[in-house]
Image: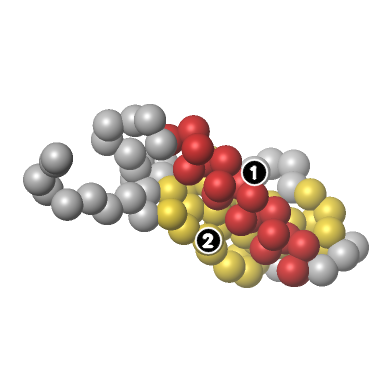
Amino acid sequence: MNRYFFDIRDDRELYPDEDGIEFSTQREAEIEAAHTLAGLARDLAGQEDRPDVAVEVRTEAGRLFQAALIFEANKCKQ
Protein backbone atom coordinates (compact mmCIF):
# COMPACT_ATOMS: atom_id res chain seq x y z
CA MET A 1 0.00 0.00 0.00
CA ASN A 2 1.21 3.47 -0.87
CA ARG A 3 0.03 6.74 0.64
CA TYR A 4 -1.09 9.22 -2.02
CA PHE A 5 -1.44 12.94 -1.36
CA PHE A 6 -3.96 15.02 -3.29
CA ASP A 7 -2.81 18.64 -3.36
CA ILE A 8 -5.27 21.19 -4.79
CA ARG A 9 -4.00 24.07 -6.91
CA ASP A 10 -6.03 26.98 -8.24
CA ASP A 11 -5.07 30.19 -10.03
CA ARG A 12 -3.76 31.68 -6.80
CA GLU A 13 -2.53 29.06 -4.41
CA LEU A 14 -1.52 25.49 -3.61
CA TYR A 15 -3.45 23.71 -0.85
CA PRO A 16 -1.34 20.73 0.27
CA ASP A 17 -2.90 17.50 1.47
CA GLU A 18 -1.30 16.79 4.83
CA ASP A 19 -2.93 13.39 5.44
CA GLY A 20 -3.14 11.46 2.18
CA ILE A 21 -5.00 8.23 1.47
CA GLU A 22 -3.61 4.72 1.13
CA PHE A 23 -4.27 2.78 -2.08
CA SER A 24 -2.96 -0.50 -3.47
CA THR A 25 -2.49 0.83 -7.00
CA GLN A 26 -1.88 4.11 -8.77
CA ARG A 27 -5.06 3.46 -10.78
CA GLU A 28 -7.08 3.77 -7.55
CA ALA A 29 -5.38 7.11 -6.88
CA GLU A 30 -6.22 8.25 -10.42
CA ILE A 31 -9.89 7.44 -9.84
CA GLU A 32 -9.83 9.33 -6.53
CA ALA A 33 -8.25 12.35 -8.27
CA ALA A 34 -11.02 12.29 -10.91
CA HIS A 35 -13.71 12.16 -8.21
CA THR A 36 -12.05 15.02 -6.34
CA LEU A 37 -11.86 17.10 -9.51
CA ALA A 38 -15.54 16.41 -10.28
CA GLY A 39 -16.48 17.62 -6.80
CA LEU A 40 -14.46 20.79 -7.28
CA ALA A 41 -16.19 21.36 -10.64
CA ARG A 42 -19.62 21.07 -8.99
CA ASP A 43 -18.60 23.47 -6.22
CA LEU A 44 -17.29 26.06 -8.69
CA ALA A 45 -19.99 25.74 -11.37
CA GLY A 46 -22.16 28.54 -9.98
CA GLN A 47 -19.38 31.09 -9.70
CA GLU A 48 -19.18 33.86 -12.28
CA ASP A 49 -15.37 33.97 -12.35
CA ARG A 50 -14.28 30.34 -11.96
CA PRO A 51 -10.60 29.61 -11.42
CA ASP A 52 -8.82 26.79 -13.20
CA VAL A 53 -8.15 24.00 -10.70
CA ALA A 54 -5.91 20.96 -10.57
CA VAL A 55 -5.40 17.96 -8.33
CA GLU A 56 -1.69 17.20 -8.08
CA VAL A 57 -1.04 13.69 -6.82
CA ARG A 58 2.19 12.68 -5.10
CA THR A 59 3.66 10.04 -2.84
CA GLU A 60 6.52 10.37 -0.40
CA ALA A 61 8.81 9.77 -3.39
CA GLY A 62 7.48 12.77 -5.31
CA ARG A 63 4.88 14.00 -7.80
CA LEU A 64 3.14 11.36 -9.95
CA PHE A 65 0.49 13.09 -12.04
CA GLN A 66 -1.93 16.00 -12.30
CA ALA A 67 -5.62 16.12 -13.25
CA ALA A 68 -6.81 19.59 -14.27
CA LEU A 69 -10.07 21.39 -15.00
CA ILE A 70 -9.80 24.48 -17.18
CA PHE A 71 -12.77 26.84 -17.39
CA GLU A 72 -12.77 28.60 -20.74
CA ALA A 73 -15.72 30.49 -22.19
CA ASN A 74 -16.39 32.59 -25.24
CA LYS A 75 -16.24 36.32 -24.57
CA CYS A 76 -19.79 37.09 -25.79
CA LYS A 77 -22.61 35.94 -23.53
CA GLN A 78 -26.00 34.95 -24.85
Q: Is residue 22 visible?
A: yes
Q: Position of residue 13 (x, y in %)?
A: 41, 42
Q: Upstream in the sequence, badge 2 or badge 1?
A: 1
**Which residue has dot 1 on it?**
17
Residue at coordinates 56% horizontally, 57% vertically from top-left? 56
Vertical position of residue 39 compared to residue 6: above or below: above
Q: Is residue 47 above or below residue 63?
A: above
Q: Which residue is mark 2?
A: 67
| Residue type marked 1 | Asp
Q: Quadrant of the N terminus?
A: bottom right
Describe residue 21's horizontal placement relative to residue 5 as left or right.
right
Q: Residue at x 33, y 50 (%)?
A: 71
Question: Farthest residue in the front direction?
Answer: 78
Q: Residue furthest left?
A: 76
Dots 2, 1 in contact, CB < 8 A: no
Up/down of 42 relative to 57, above or below: above
Residue 14 seen in the figure:
no
Q: Please state which of the two labelled residues, at mark 2 or mark 1, is closer to the viewer.
A: 2
In percent of width and height, residue 65 lies at: 58, 68
Q: Residue at x 33, y 39 (%)?
A: 50
Of residue 27 and residue 61, the one placed in the foreground of this image is: 27
